[in-house]
Image: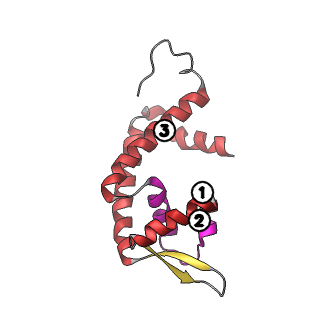
Amino acid sequence: MSQPPDDPLAQLPGYALRRAAQAMMAELGQRLAPLDLRISDASVLLLVAGRRDMTSSEIGKALDIQRANMVPLLNRLEGAGLIRREPIDRKSQAIVLSEAGLARLAQVREITARFEQDLLEKIPALHRPHFVPALQALLD
């Protein structure tokens, strides 16, 4: 989505970053839609893959999702048969992938890898090695 040439906001780094993030997330969302998954759903599958020790609280912290939003998200994934809950101890439950979740994870990884490759190809080759470190610097 390009900006009009006289757009005074287009030169503001924060504005450009927000617009780029929105455009990329919309694209990723469209790519995941045929799997009947949202980006948050796919993120949970990627995060818990191969683990048997992550609680819903830990997932929420890692993905910056509030507790009130974690409940419906995990209920949706559980209802779709993609995750299940397993006891860790007497009061904690791990969120783990089911067999169907593992199969869907393979599709998510394929879509995500292609998306990431396409995203990087939009960036001039000279700037690609610096792209992720620059984004990480904003988070530090």
Tell me, for residue 17, which label it has, or none.
Answer: none
Query: For the stretch drawn in magenta, what is the main secondary structure?
Result: helix
Q: Is residue 124 left or right of residue 67?
A: left
Marks 2/1: CA distance?
8 Å
Q: Are the residues flagged by discs 2 and 1 in contact, CB closer than 8 Å?
A: yes
Residue located beneath label 3 in the image? 22
Residue 84 is situated, as x and y percent measured from the top left of the image, at 47, 77
Q: Is residue 5 left or right of residue 11?
A: left
Disc 1 marks a residue whose amino acid type is Ile
- The residue mark sitting in front, 2 or 1, is 1
Marks 3/1: CA distance?
17 Å
Residue 65 is situated, as x and y percent measured from the top left of the image, at 60, 57
- Label 2, secondary structure: give it: helix
Which stretch is magenta? Answer: 39-58
Which residue corresponds to the image point at 65% horizontal and 40% vertical from the top-left? Answer: 138
Disc with the residue nearer the chain's start (3 vs 2): 3
Disc 3 marks a residue whose amino acid type is Gln
Residue located beneath label 1 in the image? 65
Residue located beneath label 2 in the image? 59
Which residue corresponds to the image point at 59% horizontal and 41% vertical from the top-left? Answer: 135
Q: Nearer the viewer, residue 55 or 139?
A: 55
Q: Is residue 138 left or right of residue 44?
A: right
Name the image quarter holding residue 1. Answer: top left
